[in-house]
Image (cartoon, grey):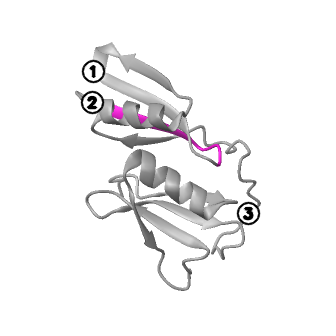
Amino acid sequence: MQVNALDHVNVITSDLERSCAFYTGLLGLERRDGPPPLTPQNAQWMYDHAGRAIVHINTEDCPRTFDRTVEPGALTGAVHHVALSCSGHDELIARIEALGLPYQANFVVSIGLRQVFVADPDNVLLELNFFGD
């Protein structure tokens, strides 16, 4: 057994439209309906340019196979952040600034990594990584 890649991140939100707009507007992800039995009213999946559904956004009342108490907007428990490998650093910074979002930038010189930290509308911290970009 081996881990090949991060498959997706699931975000529980109190405002589906707001969260989808964030991921579309900032990261350029494509919004699509989740598969049945999910409905367009309780689940949207956000796809990357390669057609992978990397962020699943669900409403608080969306049915889940493994359910637990989640409080949108609160800290995300033991998960500190979600890291995404990205390209187009300067374009992202321009989008963040145009949206007026707070962010923190970091440069790890030893490995040529530029990082941008920004929180989504439900207080999920994103680490957006740019290697050689």
Percent position (x, y) of residue 90?
31, 29
Task: Decide: is 73 above or below 125.
Answer: below
Q: Residue furthest bottom?
A: 37
Measured from the top left, where is residue 37 in percent x and y? 55, 85
Q: Find disc 2 in the rendering and name its residue.
A: 131
Task: Mark 2 or mark 1: name the one nearer the start of the chain.
Answer: 1
Q: Is residue 66 left or right of residue 97?
A: right
Q: Which residue is mark 1?
A: 112
Residue beneath label 3, please? 68
Name the element at disc 3.
loop
* First along the sequence among labels 2 and 3: 3
Given contact means CB atoms under 8 Å apart, are the residues at marks 2 and 1 in contact? yes
Residue at image location 37% in from the left, 36% down from the top:
92
Disc 1 vs disc 3: which is toward the camera? 1
- Residue 44: which disc? none
Residue 45 picture location, percent across and down: 46, 66
**Amino acid type, label 2:** Phe
